[in-house]
């Protein structure tokens, strides 16, 4: 007998099958057919760091090695200008050289370093705001 001849919908068919089968695995499978798992949020599916082997979209894109330092820098009480000086002065030590060979360096590399460090410090400022909000919420909870 075809499904159209029955006049049953999926829920009715699953309910009928539940009454006929006794195995718990089959019942669980039938319940999953009726109520499929909810698709995860897009933010949950996107990894925090891009894969280490992924191609960059731009020369100033922040990579995993840049983002690893954001939380540590955010927890320090150094001003933004001082942090920028330190990161620009020691860029190669922190993040590695921009070019494999020093002879391939071009004057615009300094500008690129500046943009990368500025992006890192923007992330640091955002992280500091998150930390402060979490501390305020914890203080509020403790005061109650």
Image (spheres, helix red, strand yellow):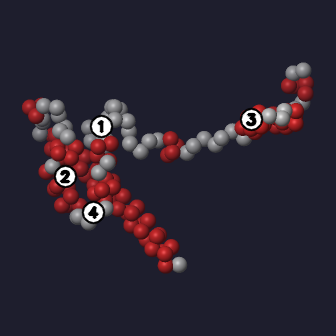
> Label 4 crowding class (10 Å Cα cut-off): few <14, some 14-19, many 20+?
few
Q: Let me know if residue 115 appears in the view.
A: no
Q: Let me know if residue 103 appears in the view.
A: yes
Q: Are marks 2 and 4 in contact (CB under 8 Å)?
A: no
Q: Is residue 17 above or below residue 48?
A: above
Name the residue that disc number 1 marks: 58
**Label 2 or label 4, whichever comes before in sequence order:** 4
| Residue 96 or residue 41, whichever sits in front | 96
Residue 79 position by quadrant: bottom left
Give the label, 4 or 3, closer to the camera.
Answer: 3
> Label 2 crowding class (10 Å Cα cut-off): few <14, some 14-19, many 20+?
many
Give the label, 4 or 1, closer to the camera.
Answer: 4
Give the label, 3 or 1, closer to the camera.
Answer: 3
CA distance separating discs 4 and 3: 53 Å
CA distance separating discs 2 and 4: 14 Å
Give the label, 1 or 2, closer to the camera.
Answer: 2
Q: Residue 6's spot in the image, x, y percent?
A: 90, 27
The kind of secondary structure element at disc 1 is loop
Which residue appears at 35% of the width and 32% of the height? 54
Which residue appears at 13% of the width and 51% of the height? 89
Name the residue that disc number 2 marks: 87
Q: Residue 83's spot in the image, x, y percent?
A: 21, 58
Name the residue that disc number 3 marks: 25
The kind of secondary structure element at disc 4 is loop
Name the residue that disc number 4 marks: 76
**Label 4 or label 1, whichever comes before in sequence order:** 1
Which residue appears at 31% of the width and 53% of the height? 70
Q: Is residue 59 above or below residue 136?
A: above
Q: Residue 3's spot in the image, x, y percent?
A: 85, 25
């Amino acid at each position: 007998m075809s499904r159209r001849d029955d006049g049953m919908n999926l829920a009715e068919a699953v309910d009928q099958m539940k009454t006929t089968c006794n195995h718990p695995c089959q019942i669980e499978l039938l319940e999953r057919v009726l109520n499929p798992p909810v698709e995860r949020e897009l933010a949950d599916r996107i990894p925090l760091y891009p894969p280490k082997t992924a191609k960059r979209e731009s020369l100033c894109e922040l990579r995993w090695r840049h983002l690893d330092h954001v939380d540590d820098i955010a927890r320090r009480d150094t001003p933004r200008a001082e942090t920028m000086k330190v990161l620009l002065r020691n860029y190669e030590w922190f993040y590695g050289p921009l070019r494999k060979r020093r002879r391939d360096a071009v004057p615009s590399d300094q500008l690129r370093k500046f943009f990368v460090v500025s992006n890192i410090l923007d992330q640091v400022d955002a992280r500091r705001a998150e930390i402060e909000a979490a501390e305020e919420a914890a203080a509020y909870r403790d005061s109650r």
